[in-house]
Amino acid sequence: MTCKPYIMIFPALLLVVLFSYIPFILTFFNSIHSVSLSGERLGFVGLANYRRLFGNQSFHASLSNTIRFTLFFVPTNITITLLAAVLSNRKGWLANLNQIFFFLPMAVGMSSMLMIIKMMFNPSIGIINRLVGANIQWFNDPNAAMALLVIAGVFLGFGFDFLLFSAALRNVPNDLKEVARINGANGFQIFRHLELPLIAPTLVFIIVTNIKNAMLISAPVLILTEGGPFRSTQTLVYQMYLDGFKSGNYALGSAIAIVVFLLTFAALLILLHLERRRIYYQ
Amino acid sequence: MKTLRATLSTVLSLLVVFPIAYSISASFFQYTDFTAVPARLLPSSLNISNYIRAFSESSLARFLFNSLLTSIIGTLLRMAISIMAAYTFSFFAFKGRNALFILIVATMLLPSDALIIANFMTIRTLRLTDTYMGIIATSLLAPTHIFMLRQYFRMMSVEYREAAIIEGCTDLRFLTTLLIPMSKAVILTLAIHSFSTIFNDYLWPLLVTNKTSMRTVQVGLTMMGFSEHLDYGPQFAAITFLMTPILIAFITLHKPITESVSIRFTGR
């Protein structure tokens, strides 16, 4: 009878050990060994893999691209989703319609959305260049390719971030806004001095999760740009995929995984710290 | 001021929905519609040939079957494992309970993308590549679900269960006739979340499947062979076919989804 609770949590425990703890330890071990193509550890090499990684041009590109992407993506995404939430936080059928449109991207699967974007931005027959009347080489110009990744990132996360912002804005008491309006505050002042401080917890939460997601970006790179042109959009997780799977260099791939882990861990620590202070529960 | 706000909001919402609207429209385009001058936004005729080609010239039906099967089985197993664990952690007193709970919940800190190389090697050792089990194996555990369910279950007092057990009720009956019906809303929300996470997963199924016949739809969609030859019609048709049921569900369930998000993430 006393072993019953252990039997009931056994599946969950087995799964965390098998697919979280063991792989984590394996990743760390592989990153300090040389590893054969079949996955066997051949010998202890200490920090040699990390030294190779940090001396590697390709890794420098991945690291700086990942950081660049994060720096471009997070502010762009937050500005647009917050703007959408603020503008559509009103009454009436048109506002309702706007809200539905804003959250619809959430209904589209990631690879579907990326394939739509890939076809829309095709330089020759894609609708974007043809509508704008420009000839932007979205896949062959380093700056345009980075912009394309940011655009894709905004569409992929739009619905969810919008919903979080709208929910937070709806929780701002109406009578407070009424009082401010009677006292002569305009729309922007109400947003800046009343709504913004009250939704700050949600804002912080979205910033941190956005940073984490941006640092882990891989699917848009895989589907849209394949890291090109000239590695200008190659990111950390994409390089991990290239080195770890395409070239079978598990040791180097594992070293990148550890770097990725440390970077996201830092972001998550900040989130947990803020959560412990219950900052986003208001 | 009011009209300016409404106008800005509407323009922005049209931009956001544009890729979806364009995909639906372009799924009816003939090849010449894509190259027409000036650029077309609407098809020249409503012709479903792209849909027929999407299914007949690719394995779309098979991809869809694989995805539905893995998402349904994965969701059911994931919910069963989570409910059982959350139930045990909320109603049983046993040695090491808190330590084991932390052991499970702490994995929320490990980003699964950073573990895929090692997980791939495990799946290969277990000879599970190109199997349904391999596709769902790593998504069977959701520490966030266990955490949230436990928070919810703990609202019910432990004496409640003890009284029921003394009356001769088994754990299974207590769960199925009392606890699960009582927690229907939260369980449903988590199940929907699980389904869409597994259904939309990309990187993992890409790694563990090699055979075309085992591809999930998210992976298969990027390898249909149409868009590489600038043959966009069938590609848009496949995408539109996939997203239409979910779009309809989202539009009709707009209110409850919005509310569940505000409850889950703002703590109200």
Image (cartoon, rainbow, N blue to C red):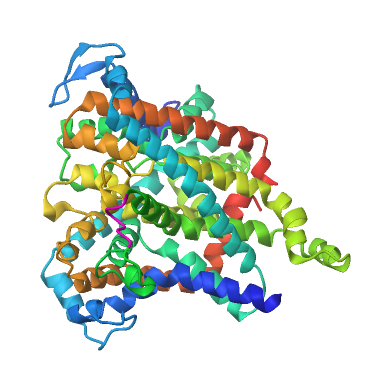
| B171 horizontally vs B261: left or right | left
| Residue A27 locus on image (x, y percent) | 30, 25
Q: Residue furthest right?
A: A183
| A179 horizontally vs A53: left or right | right
Position of residue B28 relative to residue A87, above or below, is below
Q: Nearer the viewer, residue A5 or B205?
A: B205
- In reply to whether residue B241 is colored magenta, the answer given is no
| B223 horizontally vs B183: left or right | left
Q: Quadrant of residue A168?
A: bottom right
Which quarter shows the N terminus of chain A?
top left
Q: Nearer the viewer, residue A52 or B244?
A: A52
Position of residue B47 relative to residue B78, above or below, is below
- In reply to whether residue A137 is colored magenta, the answer given is yes
Q: Residue at x 64, y 79 (%)?
A: A92
Where are the magenta residues, as a range? A136-141
Total marks placed? 0
| Residue A140 locus on image (x, y percent) | 27, 53
Q: Quadrant of residue A28?
A: top left
> Visible in this render: residue A59?
yes
Q: Nearer the viewer, residue A58 or B157?
A: A58
Q: Residue at x 44, y 61 (%)?
A: A106
> Visible in this render: residue B84?
no
Tell me the chief SS of the magenta region: loop
| Residue A48 locus on image (x, y percent) | 27, 14
Q: Residue at x 11, y 50 (%)?
A: B211
Q: Nearer the viewer, residue A217 or A149?
A: A149
Q: Residue at x 36, y 54 (%)?
A: A144
| B215 horizontally vs A151: left or right | left
Q: Residue furthest bottom?
A: B45
| Residue B90 locus on image (x, y percent) | 54, 37
